[in-house]
Image: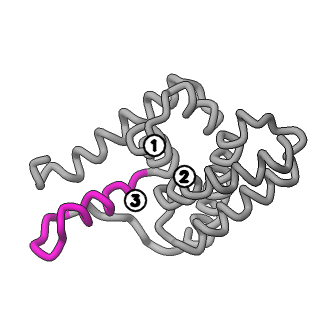
Amino acid sequence: MTIEDYNKGVDVWADDAYRFARSCNSDDNICRDAVQEAFAKLWERRGKVPKERGKAYLLSTIHNYLASRFRYDQLRAAGEAGAEGRVEPDTAFELRDAIAQAFQSLPPIQRECLQLRDVEGYAYKEISSILSLSEDQVSVYIFRARVALRKKLIDYKI
């Protein structure tokens, strides 16, 4: 990847990278940090990353950053009781908010797989490459995520 390819990549991939990070984490500052860190690592390794693998490398780096951040947050909050409850229908919640809350309650790997497949439109093979998983694992994670969302949103008759 040349410097020109990198600069074009920043222009083309920045929105997708942020959207991917945002789908995995609801904290705007953490998402911006993840995207910034991913572009910094891509810059450092621009000579080793082929131009056609630039976006996949970027999304993989974001995934790894957010996963390590999630593990750190889990360890820090280990002493607190924080089991997330079920999304209950309430007149104050819009359906969109309930879907977003249910999506955020998914385990990070399921959320990332589902985001890449259903929102971003990647093929299973591309997702397996981005997240360093087998295609079978990707398929299982997506299936489990959809089942979990269905259970959480059953009261809305979606």
Q: Is residue 135 left or right of residue 129?
A: left
Give the residue type that dot 2 points to: Asp
Q: Position of residue 80 (x, y in %)?
A: 49, 74
Real-space CA distance between mark 2 and mark 1, rounded to the nearest whole angstrom: 8 Å
Real-space CA distance between mark 2 and mark 3, rounded to the nearest whole angstrom: 18 Å
Residue at disc 1, secondary structure: loop
Report the residue marked by disc 1.
Answer: 120
Residue at disc 3, secondary structure: helix
Q: Say which quarter of the image contains residue 89.
A: bottom left
Report the residue marked by disc 2.
Answer: 16
Q: Nearer the viewer, residue 153 or 39?
A: 39
Give the residue type that dot 3 points to: Gln
Residue at 29% over, 39% down: 147
Q: Nearer the viewer, residue 41 or 73?
A: 41
Q: Nearer the viewer, mark 3 or mark 1?
A: 1
Task: Name the disc covering residue 104, or none.
Answer: 3
Give the residue type that dot 1 points to: Glu
Marked residue nearer the N-terminal end (2 or 1)? 2
Marked residue nearer the N-terminal end (3 or 1)? 3
Q: Is residue 144 left or right of residue 23?
A: left
Real-space CA distance between mark 3 and mark 1, rounded to the nearest whole angstrom: 17 Å
Q: Is residue 79 left or right of residue 117?
A: right
Q: Please provide the residue range marked out in magenta.
A: 88-106
Q: Contact (CB < 8 A) between labels 2 and 1? A: yes
